[in-house]
Amino acid sequence: MIELERLTRTFDGRGGVRDVDLTVDDGEMIAIVGPSGCGKSTLLSLIVGLDAPTSGALRIDGRDATRLDPKQRGVALVFQSYALYPHFDVRRNIAFPLEIDRVGKAEIDARVRATAERLAIAHLLDRKPKQLSGGERQRVALARAIVRRPRVCLFDEPLSNLDPALRAQMRVEIRALHRELGATFVWVTHDQAEAMTLADRVVVLREGRVRQVGPPREIYARPVDTFVASFFGAPAINLMEGDTLGVRPEHVTVARSGDGVQGRVVLVEPLGAETWVTVDGGGARITGRGDPELTTGDAVVARWEASDVLRFDERGARVEGPAVVDAPP
């Protein structure tokens, strides 16, 4: 279990993270998300011990780890850049943390082999990093992190350098690895798809403060404010002025006729199985699912159900209860 209590790290009184209260359960996988500069990596550095907080407390398994040396925390970190030693082969890259811990050679060999087999890289043990693909390097970095059997694994945007197809494949493999290991995983990413597919819970940061914590579906369906609502979902949620209404594009249908908001097509995006159509409707831009045969300038209507609308107040906070209108005034 990881417990953060009013954890704060500022730099000359600015930036960093502020008053973060968060408990990560034993064996849980959480994702920390937010825009660039929101404090994601700072928070990770505080947990692993690469940085010290300005104030607040950090506990790991109930033990005060606020000022504890990183080696004493039982925490492993996987970097975005993989950080492999180029002059070591894969075997030595994986073994290196165990060598530092003065583990016996026979034990090192056994654990390296078992970990490599678990991640399907046993056939790469004699190769150097420069001979590996991006996905293979990522697996080596993962192997090096878990070979010590850490209680906590931290990941700092480890898939961001991979192409989309490989990224999707690695998400599946990492979720399976998490279930197999039973360790606590903390995953930092700016990719909402990673957060939604990998995590048991999502932590949304903005300007160093926690805006919302909850299961992915709750974050998506019941965002606390317009920032969280806009951060999750692709295409982004439609926000319309008036009472500040929000409706997600997947709940909007764009058609040539019928009831709804009248407007004209300004953008058509065919994406294979579905087509997103953006409509200029009386000053509001509304995106929804539409016919791929639509073209720019076509007269259309955009419609949705009242039950799919989120309502926000003038400060951007979500208002409980359904909106009572199904179209902007």
Image (cartoon, rainbow, N blue to C red):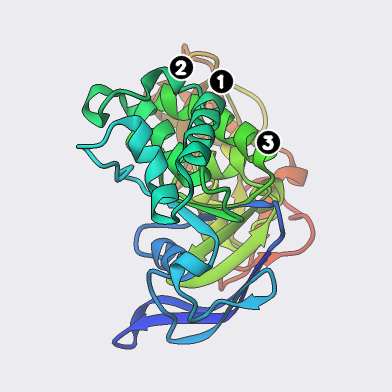
Which residue is labeled 1 in the image? Answer: 256
Task: Provide residue 322's location: percent of width, then percent of height.
Answer: 77, 55
Q: Looking at the image, which is closer to me, 28 or 86?
A: 86
For the residues labelled 2 and 3, say whether their Cβ atoms are less than 8 Å apart: no
Left or right of 147: which side holds 12? left
Task: Provide residue 319's location: percent of width, then percent of height.
Answer: 71, 65
Answer few, some or many: residues within 10 Å of disc 1's Cα (few below 14, many 20 plus, some between 14 and 19): some
Q: Looking at the image, which is closer to me, 258 or 291?
A: 291
Q: Sequence-wise, which precedes: disc 2 or disc 3?
A: 3
Left or right of 238: which side holds 9? left
Q: Amino acid at mark 3?
A: Glu
Distance from the alpha carbon under mark 2 to that under mark 3: 48 Å
Distance from the alpha carbon under mark 1 to that under mark 2: 8 Å
Q: Quadrant of the N terminus?
A: bottom right
Task: Provide residue 69's location: percent of width, then percent of height.
Answer: 45, 74
Q: Nearer the viewer, mark 3 or mark 1?
A: 3
For the residues labelled 1 and 2, say whether their Cβ atoms are less than 8 Å apart: yes
Residue 78 in view, yes or no: no
Q: Give the vertical position of 186 relative to 234 (above or below).
A: below
Residue 294, numbered circle: 2
Q: Amino acid at mark 2?
A: Leu
Q: Amino acid at mark 1?
A: Arg
Q: Sequence-wise, which precedes: disc 1 or disc 2?
A: 1
Task: Provide residue 73's location: percent of width, then percent of height.
Answer: 53, 67
Q: Nearer the viewer, mark 1 or mark 2?
A: 2
The quadrant where residue 165 appears: top left
Answer few, some or many: residues within 10 Å of disc 3's Cα (few below 14, many 20 plus, some between 14 and 19): few
Left or right of 52: which side holds 223? right
Which element carries disc 2, helix, strand or loop? loop
Residue 180, numbered circle: 3
